[in-house]
Image (cartoon, grey):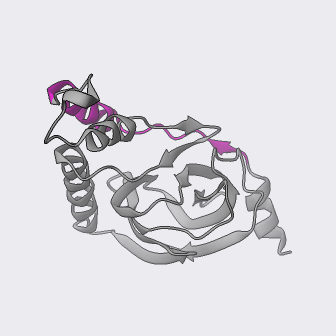
Amino acid sequence: MDKDFEDLFNSAASPVAPPPELKSAIMARIDETEQVTDLSSARGKQPSRRLFAVAAAVLLVAGSGVVVTQFSNNDASESITAQGIDEMHAVMGAEDARQGQVDAMGATLDIVLSSDMGKGGAMVNGQPALAHGMGAQVWAVMDDGAMKSAGVIGQEPHDDVWMPLPGDTTSVLVTEEVAAGAEQPSGAVLAKVEL
């Protein structure tokens, strides 16, 4: 194994918190959504969709990353998707924008970064085909070899889910890890892209 690559694997990952506006948007949508308490009286309504909305609002923070999940097809998910698309377009408009794309066993990541803006991210689509209980963990690799987990892509389908990345990311590494996430890369490398 290449020494530089081995050093990347041995670097400690730092937690990446989801943006505060994401939580605010989700919580506001939950507050506005009528909650069904008696499923037998909910004729004509879609209780499973309501339950999905609540489940979608939960961000699973495990180990050092955020588990990226598919949101149900409702106004809250459309709002979050629109925010991610707006964020991606804003970063793409930067003069120093860097772009890349990678496929991780069926999950496609369209990556855009800007050092000047100090931010970037990956638009996740599709779903990784992995063993039961496993996920595709995304690692932002910095110029000095330090790595930060951007989260774990679960095996459910994803449709334009925005995964924030630090603007000083120089490459993205995707490894197969337990669905709860790992503190540092330890599983099989699914993809790697230099940016």
Q: Nearer the viewer, residue 164 or 67?
A: 67
Toward the front, the furthest residue is 40
Q: Is residue 14 magenta?
A: yes
Query: In this view of the protein, can residue 34 be seen by the observer?
Result: yes
Q: Which residue is drawn at 20% across and 57% down?
A: 86
User: Could you tell me residue 3's position as x and y percent?
Assistant: 84, 69
Residue sitting nearer the eye, 106 or 187: 106
Q: Quadrant of the N terminus?
A: bottom right
Q: Is residue 157 part of the magenta span, yes or no?
A: no
x and y percent of residue 14 in the render? 62, 41
Left or right relative to 54: residue 149: right
- Residue 7 horizontal side relative to residue 104, left or right: right
Q: Quadrant of residue 22?
A: top left
What secondary structure prevails in the magenta region?
Answer: helix
In magenta, the rendered stretch is 12-32
Residue 153 appears at what percent x and percent y? 52, 57
Q: Would residue 126 be found to the left or right of residue 146 on screen?
A: left
Is residue 114 in view from this perspective? no
Q: Quadrant of residue 36?
A: top left
